[in-house]
Amino acid sequence: KAGVTQTPRYLIKTRGQQVTLSCSPISGHRSVSWYQQTPGQGLQFLFEYFSETQRNKGNFPGRFSGRQFSNSRSEMNVSTLELGDSALYLCASSLEQAVRDNEQFFGPGTRLTVL
Amino acid sequence: AQKVTQAQTEISVVEKEDVTLDCVYETRDTTYYLFWYKQPPSGELVFLIRRNSFDEQNEISGRYSWNFQKSTSSFNFTITASQVVDSAVYFCALSDALVDTGRRALTFGSGTRLQVQP
């Protein structure tokens, strides 16, 4: 079974631009969660999507948004990029909602650099 | 609010030494889950173990063992006879109810970087 895939793996943008990251969960998994990892703040939960609906949201500004498609693939969008958005963005999938404490499988991440 | 503390920022050991990574958590929930993840240089988080708050039995899996003590809110991870391939950042995480939504998400500790020297 293929694991969680994330594209692109690396991305360089400039301040003010917007960016879209993509995550394809493990086949059959319906929940996708997004995390941001920075040296300063560590790993932080962004949001979770299940059945095309956002079910959980972390403490991030509205510039961070996402969506999930009917095939469970998910995209995350960051608008008006700031230098502090430079991070490794990790996607995790699970069979059911993470709220049911199903094991989450993580992708390799997308490393975003904002110049 | 939930919190996970990994006080050890970096640990360096020589191969074959035993090493223990500490994790202390805070939560007001009576039902919660604790996790350990390994993050090798490639960046992908690898799941190691999950324990629920009602199961305090220690667990051993090969060279890995975990000690869960509710009395001290700790969930420590020991690697026996460490190997160079164990070099990675290890994260402890807590899953409990988010205060405002009642739903659960993972709260991670800051991680412990383990360097195993040959």
Image: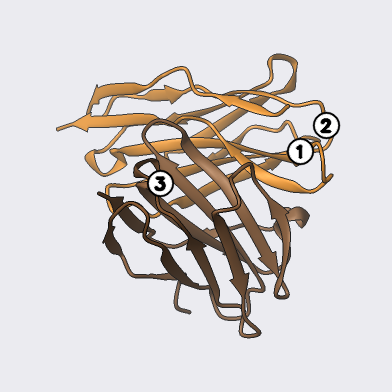
Locate residue B49, reporting x and y percent: 57, 45
How packed mark 2 is, by other alpha carbons closer than 10 Å (few <14, some 14-19, many 20 or more), is some
**Is residue B61 shown to the viewer in this render?**
no
Q: Report which residue position mark 1 lands on.
A: B32
Q: Which mark is residue A102?
A: none
**Colour in which chain B is drawn:** orange
Q: Nearer the viewer, residue A74 or B38?
A: A74
Q: Which mark is residue B29?
A: 2
Who's the residue at 31% across and 65% down the image?
A: A9
Locate residue A37, reporting x and y percent: 43, 44
Quadrant in the picture for residue B12: top left
Amino acid type shown at disc 2:
Asp
Image height of A71 relative to B73, above or below:
below
Who's the residue at 74% across and 47% down the image?
A: B104
Q: Which chain is brown?
A: A
Marks 1 and 2 share the same chain:
yes
Q: Residue furthest left?
A: B118
Who's the residue at 43% across and 67% down the image?
A: A21
Helix, strand or loop at mark 3? helix
- Residue B108 located left or right of residue B68: left
Q: Which mark is residue A85?
A: 3
Q: Are marks 1 and 2 in contact (CB under 8 Å)?
A: yes
